[in-house]
Amino acid sequence: MTTTHKSEAPATGPRGRRRSFDLDEAVDTAMRLFHARGYDAVGVAELGAELGIKPPSFYAAFGSKAGLFERALQRYAAGEANIFAKALEEGGGVAAVIARTLDLAARLYPERNGVAGCLVLDGARNSADPEACALSAAAKTASRNALRDFIAAERPDRAEDLADFVVIAMAGMSAAARDGAGESTLKPFAETISRAFQRELSSEG
Amino acid sequence: MTTTHKSEAPATGPRGRRRSFDLDEAVDTAMRLFHARGYDAVGVAELGAELGIKPPSFYAAFGSKAGLFERALQRYAAGEANIFAKALEEGGGVAAVIARTLDLAARLYPERNGVAGCLVLDGARNSADPEACALSAAAKTASRNALRDFIAAERPDRAEDLADFVVIAMAGMSAAARDGAGESTLKPFAETISRAFQRELSSEG
DNA sequence: CGGTATATATAGCGGTCACTACACAAACTC
DNA sequence: GAGTTTGTGTAGTGACCGCTATATATACCG
């Protein structure tokens, strides 16, 4: 169980037949599949089989494959995988939070149960579906903006390019993890990037 | 014209009918398409249409879609896009060559005519075809080993992790470029990474 | 010229893609 | 109970996937 906000049935529910599967659980499963192999490589047939539901139920619940991907992205950003949000929780200044974010990436991005890297950064990479690409791009922009706004508190003059610096580094770690890099490979990178970031943060530039 | 090694027809050629299209040109076109949208997103039908050839000619010439991808990867590694080889040409020590490599990545990775990033690093990202993934992985390993062997001349004790550092940084730049980052975004990253690399190179670690 | 070898074009193979029409089953209101 | 609403299962849509069987056109050899 990763989330506890399951939508409770109202006192007087809708009239018709009730759903035969857990929606949150289904989104979790889909998120894992999309994360492991990328949007295009996971078919609706496989999703249905894995979730234990047939196509009509699938489309009644999610509207489309891209609709499910959108929910998966939301779930991803709202959960443990949002490493920046996780790094923020422990407080501290920009340098400390960014260092913690990079460290978390080095520890969480390596492959585990077939899943590696970041769903937002690489989930729709090379996808032929414009809708999936747009959803992915929006999620990336949101993440980058959160980073930028946080950095701006200490360095408003350089928030944009410092955010870019971190984002590019994380994209590299995600790609490397998807190519098989382990924590022992990513950690030195993350530490070097953290030091470089601190120098940039406290430079006069 | 990017290559000049066109295979010349022998004095006495094969007996049958001659090919009606230029093979090198076809590989170039396919390379561009694979690079622009990724392996899976480019279909054999589109390749045939773009190359001006029909399926039977396609398979007679390349064996399979993956066979053409392999040729495209070879062409890519043998041409201008091999930025490490290009950086090596001008000579210099490890620090200078790596700095030049990263600078070239920052200048060549941003989108141009629909093509962005590195074909080797991202051409088969999220592909569902095991053959394309294997070809891509082999090309990545070859590139990384070339980097590592070069670095080993000055720092044999740290060649592996320094090579990883550069590869992860380049993967980040390629991914960022494919997400729309321009030269003005990649260049500061490349310069900071170059400085960080130099510090690592001349450290006692 | 005949014989042979090679590339071509037409057409279509089996399979998978995301998605849906239709009828039935189940839970509500009254 | 009747009536309404909603989800589910069966089956199948047209389009595209990588790839190929077959026959024909074009070049070489002798």
Image: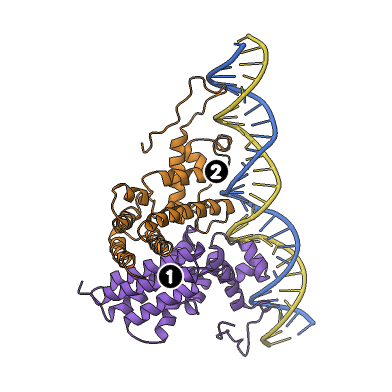
Chain colours: A orange, B purple, C blue, D yellow
Vertical side of A76 occupied by A128: above or below = below
Q: Which is more toward the observer, D22 or A25?
A: A25
Tags 2 and 1 on a common chain: no
Q: Residue at x 40, y 75 (%)?
A: B102
Vertical side of A100 occupied by A48: above or below = above
User: Which numbered dot is residue A67?
Assistant: 2
At label 2, the amino acid type is Gly
Q: Nearer the viewer, mark 2 or mark 1?
A: 2
Look at the image and tell me in which quarter the N terminus of chain B lies: bottom right
Place of residue A28 in the rendered image (x, y in percent of width and height, measured from the top left)? 43, 41
Q: Residue at x 50, y 49 (%)?
A: A42
On the rendered structure, is B46 left or right of A162?
Answer: right
Vertical side of B85 occupied by A163: above or below = above
Using the rendered view, name the quadrant where residue B154 is placed: bottom left
Vertical side of A100 occupied by B148: above or below = below
* Residue B64 can be seen, yes or no: no
Q: Residue at x 34, y 61 (%)?
A: A181
User: Which numbered dot is residue B139?
Assistant: 1
Q: Secondary structure at mark 2?
A: helix
